[in-house]
Image (spheres, grey):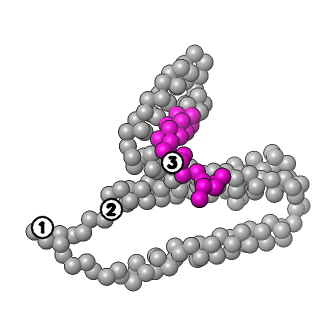
Amino acid sequence: MATPLDLGALAAFDKVFTFILVGVLVYAFLSKVDYFSGDRKIFAAIVAIAISLLTMSSNIVIKSVNLMAPWFVLLIIFAMFMMLAFMMFGYSLEDVKVFITKGEFGAGIWVMWLVIIIGIGSVVAVWQEETGFEKLTRDGNVTQELPPSEEYGFWQTLFHPKILGMALVMLIAFFTMKFMTETKV
């Protein structure tokens, strides 16, 4: 049954969306570089188009970008809600900027780590999906696979979605209590 929210037909355009996204982001980044300012903006556009075309040649890159994009959108929406929450409690936009860039919490560093984790995680997930795991062979014969170690079970438990969700809720509660009980002088 077709529903208005069924976006399966847009899956055919994943290469086009990736081309546009990479082109726009590379152009936006290069336009901030001093070398490409003024009359040289056309060179920034040419480089952006060239990188976008190179992106189209690799399925791993296309799938990685398509896997990363929703996570970055979620990160941006979460950051906007956090800034809105701070501003709702009386902080100005300048206070929020100082908090992100120079605050004792180091929110900018946390965001950079999240971006790195999203990027590496997406590339590894797609690489693993595309290439798969190769079994160890000896003289062309497949050897017997060993059962997962206890360390494997530990990491599976540690990174289980329920455990990660609980850790996120605990971090939010910790920082909520920290900032609500902090006295301003």
Which disc number belongs to residue 11? 3
Queried whether the magenta region covers residue 14, the answer comes back as yes
**Residue 61 percent across, percent down from the top left:** 42, 46
Q: Disc 3, disc 2: CB below 8 Å? A: no
Q: Disc 3, disc 1: CB below 8 Å? A: no
- Looking at the image, is 145 positioned above or below residue 12? below
**Residue 131 percent across, percent down from the top left:** 32, 57
**Residue 99 percent across, percent down from the top left:** 75, 53
The stretch in magenta equals 1-26
In depth, the one of 82 and 12 nearer the eye is 12
Indicate which disc, 3 or 1, sits on the residue closer to the N terminus. Answer: 3
- Looking at the image, is 142 positioned above or below residue 121? below
Graded by Cα atoms within 10 Å as few (under 14), some (14 to 19) or many (20 or more), the crowding at tag 2 reads few
Q: Disc 2, disc 1: CB below 8 Å? A: no
Q: Which residue is mark 2?
A: 132
Q: Marks 3/2: CA distance? A: 23 Å
Q: Is residue 127 left or right of residue 34?
A: left
Q: Which residue is mark 1?
A: 140
Q: Quadrant of residue 137?
A: bottom left
